[in-house]
Amino acid sequence: MNAPAAGVRYASVVLDVDSTLTRVEGIEWLAERRGPRVAQAVAEMTQRAMEGGTPLDAVYGARLALVKPARSDVDALADAYSAGVVPGARLAIGEVQAAGIRVVAVSGGLRQAVARFAISLGIAGRDIYAVSLRFTADGEYAGFDETSPLARRGGKPIVVRGLGLARPIIGVGDGSTDAELKTMAGGDIPAVDAFAAFVGVASRPAVVAVADYVVHNMAELPALVLGTAVPARS
């Protein structure tokens, strides 16, 4: 796909959540509550997946099996997401929505935490997609939705194509699963028309390399989406 021309106005925005709308990387935050051994193991798996060295499918269930997040852990994660919100996220989302542009959150994170946080930023519940957990009657971890495309490689493009969003679409995120929105085509048509690497929390060279734009902070997002400015690539 050729890089989009400067001044493109996008009709839809697909946002990642962890390390994009919030500084928190949810599964790592949860792992830290289980002690240094679990935290290190999960961090290493997450890093390999986010850099694209290991398919998400290979680590998703394994990380949760190590952490076994209870309902109380996930509630605490939602609070941590809010405490770690990146500067300007609420304002940027509101400005884009005020222009009539649809904003959806598509995350490989845990829906029970992601949804509460994203709704607080002004994203409608129906426009939030993440992976649901199951709990026992007393709130202990009982598994996750293994049928969710978002728990495996190539899942974000599948979800976004299924939404029927108005085009042109721009995806924004920090990880390899976000970059797949552009790099994994279905019928030779990528799920989004452009991809912006968000580097305000973590900058991953492999993700930046395939991006059309590089966004350093959320204050840059409205102008990019509305076509009034284009962030520098460096």
Image (spheres, helix red, strand yellow):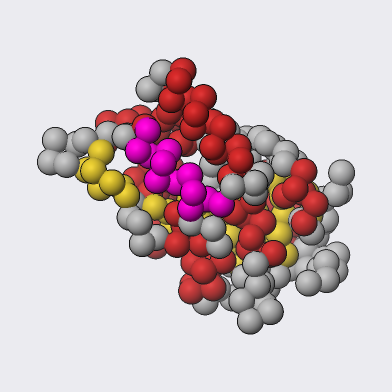
Foreground residue among 220 and 162: 162
Tell me the quarter of the image containing the C terminus.
top right
Residue furthest bottom in the image: 187
Please report the residue visible at 36 percent of the width from the left and 32 percent of the height from the top.
67
Q: Quadrant of residue 2?
A: bottom right
**Position of residue 3 in the picture relative to residue 38 (left or right):** right
Determine if residue 14 is in view: yes
Foreground residue among 199 and 141: 141
Residue 221 magenta-highlighted: no
Determine if residue 92 is in view: no
Please report the residue visible at 65 percent of the width from the left and 72 percent of the height from the top.
185
Relative height, residue 224 to residue 58 (above, below): below
Residue 63 magenta-highlighted: yes
In terms of secondary structure, what is the magenta stretch mainly? helix
Q: Quadrant of residue 71?
A: top left
Relative height, residue 118 to residue 227 (above, below): above
Number of dots carrying numbers: 0
Please report the residue visible at 31 percent of the width from the left and 34 percent of the height from the top.
68
**Rendered location of residue 115, percent (x, y):** 39, 49
Residue furthest left in the image: 137
**Rendered location of residue 232, percent (x, y):** 86, 48
**Position of residue 125 in the picture relative to residue 12 (left or right):** left
**Rendered location of residue 11, percent (x, y):** 64, 70
Please report the residue visible at 49 percent of the width from the left and 49 percent of the height from the top.
58
Q: Which residues are magenta?
A: 55-66
Relative height, residue 218 to residue 3 (above, below): above
Residue furthest top in the image: 36
